[in-house]
Image: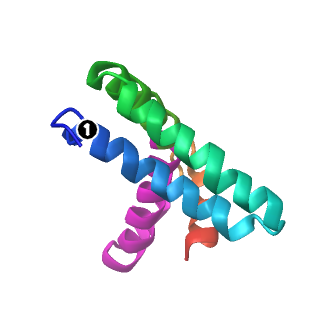
Amino acid sequence: MSSIANSSIKGFAFNVFDKVRIIADRRIQNGIVKKFWDWFATRHIKSIILQSSDIELEKDLKDIYELLEPHFKTVDMSLQLHKSKELNSPEMTEKLMQMPDFAKIAELMNDVM
C-alpha cells in the first residue's frame, strides 16, 4: 500500500470500521448474508476509506465523535458521581443529587454499576 493508505486518519477510520465489523459479525447468522457482508460490504467500505481524502475522513469521524460524545460524557459523569458518593459527605452528595439532570444520570449510574 502507498503512504496515502498508511495515513493516521485512514488507520483510525479502519479501526472504527473494524469495531463496527465485529458488532456485525457477532450478529450475522445467515451464511449467505455473512459471505455477502465479508465480500461486498467489508471490501467496499475499505475501498471507500482508501479513496477518501484525510480531510473528508476527519470530518466524517468528527461527526461520529459528536454523535457518541454526549452518551460517554453522561456515563463518565455518572461514574464520577458514583465515586463521589464514596468520597464526599452526605451533605455534598445531596447537593450533587439536586443537579438538573441528576435523574437521568442516577438511572445511568444504576445501569453502569
Name the colour scheme. Answer: rainbow
Q: Percent position (x, y) of residue 82?
A: 45, 71
Q: Is residue 19 above or below residue 52?
A: below
Instruction: Point out the image quarter for the C terminus.
Output: bottom right
Residue at the extreme left of the image, as rendered: 3
What residue appears at the point 26 percent right and 37 percent down from the top-left corner? 9
Q: Secondary structure at mark 1?
A: loop
What residue appears at the point 56 percent right and 57 percent down from the top-left corner? 21
What residue appears at the point 81 percent right and 69 percent down from the top-left corner? 29
| Magenta-colored segment: predominant secondary structure | helix
- Residue 107 appears in the figure: no
Q: Percent position (x, y) of residue 59?
A: 37, 22
Q: Percent position (x, y) of residue 108?
A: 61, 61
Instruction: Look at the image and say whether residue 92 sits in the magenta stretch.
Output: yes
User: Which contiguous range is marked in magenta?
Assistant: 69-95
| Of 8 and 81, the residue lying toward us | 8
Number of labels in the image equals 1
Q: Percent position (x, y) of residue 109?
A: 56, 67
Instruction: Look at the image and say whether residue 75 sits in the magenta stretch.
Output: yes
Query: Three-letter amino acid code at disc 1?
Result: Ala
What residue appears at the point 80 percent right and 67 percent down from the top-left corner? 31
| Of 9 and 59, the residue lying toward us | 9
Is residue 78 found left or right of 106 in the rendered image?
left
Instruction: Point out the image quarter for the N terminus.
Output: top left
| Of 98 and 24, the residue lying toward us | 24
In this figure, which residue is indicated by the disc labeled 1? 5
Is residue 106 found left or right of 1 in the rendered image?
right
- Residue 54 appears in the figure: yes
